[in-house]
Amino acid sequence: MSDFNSKTLGKCLCIITGASKGFGRCLAQQVPPLLVAGSALILVARTGQLLQELKTELVNLGVSQGLVVRCVAADLSTAEGVAETLQAAKQQNVNDYDHVLLINNAVRTATPDTMHLISCLPLVD
């Protein structure tokens, strides 16, 4: 487990929503160097093509080396989008990680239709 003063986040499952543009994209570029090999980075946004371009950029820059990078094209204002994102996260074994980090930067947030999907999530870390 990484400590507060370390320069890494340790082995981490990191989910960044709104990752295709603006602040979310900037975070997606800055976080990978803080993750150790074996970490997973799940990039979520409505525009799949922009996510794939970001993934390619991370690979070309070498900052994603040793990471599992997944792109999830999903609209988080819909139940289907939330379910797709949760499914991508569930494909990772959270017991393999020191931390689970959610950077919720999606422009659209939960609606009454989607609140039940996230309100029952167990606390992690």
Image (tube, rainbow, N blue to C red):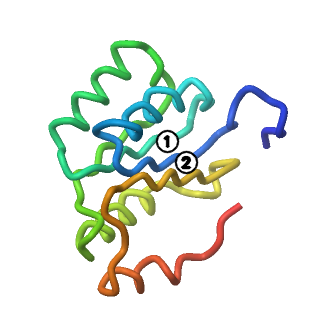
User: Label 2: how many residues lie within 10 Å, few (<14), some (14-19) or many (20+)?
Assistant: many
How far apart are labels 1 and 2 at the CA level?
A: 5 Å
- In depth, the one of 104 and 81 nearer the eye is 104
User: Label 1: how many residues lie within 10 Å, few (<14), some (14-19) or many (20+)?
Assistant: many
| Three-letter code, disc 2 | Leu
> Which residue is found at the position 79% from the left and 43% from the top?
1
- In depth, the one of 38 and 111 nearer the eye is 111
Coordinates of residue 84 in the picture (x, y in percent): 29, 64
Q: Which residue is mark 1?
A: 40
| Three-letter code, disc 1 | Ala
Local secondary structure at mark 1: strand
Image position of 123 with respect to 56: above or below: below
Coordinates of residue 17 in the picture (x, y in percent): 39, 51
Q: Which residue is mark 2?
A: 13
Q: Quadrant of residue 109?
A: bottom left
Image position of 99 with respect to 110: above or below: above
Q: Marks 2 and 1: in contact by CB < 8 Å? A: yes
Local secondary structure at mark 2: strand
- Find the residue positioned furthest to the top: 61
> Which residue is found at the position 44% from the left and 36% from the top?
68
